[in-house]
Amino acid sequence: MTTSTAIRPLAPSEQIFAGAQVYVGYAVQVSGRLDPAALSSAYDAVVRAYPVLGAGLEPTESGNHVLVAGTGAAPEISVVDSDPERLLVAPAFDQRVALSALRVVRDGETASVTLLTHHSVADAYHSLAVLAELWSCYTDVVDGHSVEREVQPYPQSVEELLAARGIEKTAEPDAAEQPTPGGSVLSDSAAASIPVAHSGSAASPGRATTNAAATSNAARVPEPAMPEAVSEDTGFVSLRTTRCHLSSAETAELVELGHREGVTINGLVSAAIMLGEAEVLGLALTDILLTYPVDLRSRLIPPVGLTEGTNVLGFANHLSTANIGLLDLARGICESLRAGLASGTVQRTPLHIPEMAGELELMPGMVLVTNWGRVPDLRAPDGLHINDFRSTLTARADRTGGHDPEVPGGSACIVSTFGGRLSIEIHHPESTTAQQQRRIDALTAKLRGALAARADSAQSG
């Protein structure tokens, strides 16, 4: 420990991201005039308003970490001349110094601007609110307006938020509440990798008895060693992204299909991902386990503000008991989530994280889906156009604990909607590009197939 002012120790829901120094990136791709000096001023204002972004993490003798106050100055932004499709060029971060970063990659009149936040102190819902504030401040700087914002307190852990609302961990959780071993990947999908048995299941899906077929067939699409994904210079992971990006018309049709069938976009997309994974792996649908995080903010009483908590996430999963189609599968996913929320099972799952330490490994047949929902509207000054939103992530080995950096990817998807277009991204090393493209092609075909079937039904009706 240094002499820095200690704020508080990390809770288990936060500590799981400290060992590998997990940073998640929220990137916008822009065209027009981007002013780096104005962007730096905006970032300064945001860090002043959200001091956790300039804070650091210090290791303790027990192997955990403590949140410590920063110096008050915003971390410097990095501006690199390169291909803006490369959101991170030579990523290098130090969680002891700052828990956020701003990276600009530009080429002439186009650029990507990526806000990175450490996953120990901010989940996607928290971070997207900060992203919106960053672009609001940037617009105000360019337009000559004040960028002073009210200073926010340090966010609380989900454990603190649940305790304040009288939600307690059950002494002996039943089979429907006991978390099952999951996979560890470095994004909001990392939270999703801590699954619980879906409400109503007779056993805990995800254990060996459930995934025996998936395990025996895993060699069909191997996950090779991926040392080339880790920079020898920085120790941080550099990843490629394979993406499904629906048109605005297709996205609107998918929303309409959900309304007509009484299912959510999350249910439809998750069903497509499960069906696509079964196809790619050559497995039955019943051998595919879906696991995903659930934002608890609006589901607690009183509700929690977007930046009032760090990782305010419960966990849910779904295992189909029959080989069914996309719409029936989507209904099952939505129904099991409703049941888990109604029983309080999903809300209590974060409290079981300590028991899961050491049990986390990605199992064949498991799909991890994190849905960030609709990205908030982002302000921009005249002369600058925000064209797209992307996600990214990186991590490295823990300098204090000696853990090897784990490479994200596999069957882990990040879902978001920006500018009326649905996006599904898989982050992965170069060596698995062909494999991940098969996954993206399969799930895209499932979604477009459902839209085509709806169009045919409408014409015949």
Image (tube, rainbow, N blue to C red):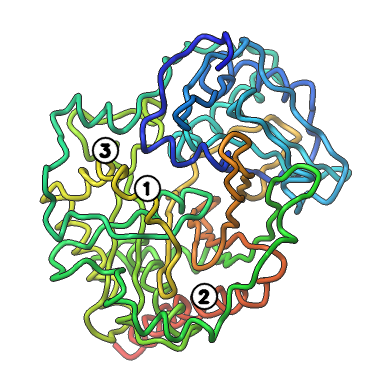
* Amino acid of disc 2: Thr
Mark found first going from the N terminus, 2 or 1? 1
Is residue 456 or residue 223 the one in the foreground? 223
Q: Is residue 455 above or below residue 167?
A: below
Residue under label 1: 357
Q: Residue at 49%, 75% (x, y): give it.
A: 443
The image shows residue 213 at horizontal and vertical percentages of 36, 85
* Amino acid of disc 3: Ser
**Direction from residue 72 to residue 367 in the image, left or right:** left
Q: Secondary structure at mark 2?
A: helix
**Direction from residue 126 to residue 423 in the image, left or right:** right
Is residue 181 or residue 114 the one in the foreground? 181
Quadrant in the rendering for residue 140: top right
Residue under label 3: 298
Q: Secondary structure at mark 3?
A: helix
Q: Residue at 10%, 51% (x, y): give it.
A: 343
Number of numbered discs present?
Answer: 3
Residue 50 visible? The answer is no
Is residue 402 or residue 72 the one in the foreground? 402
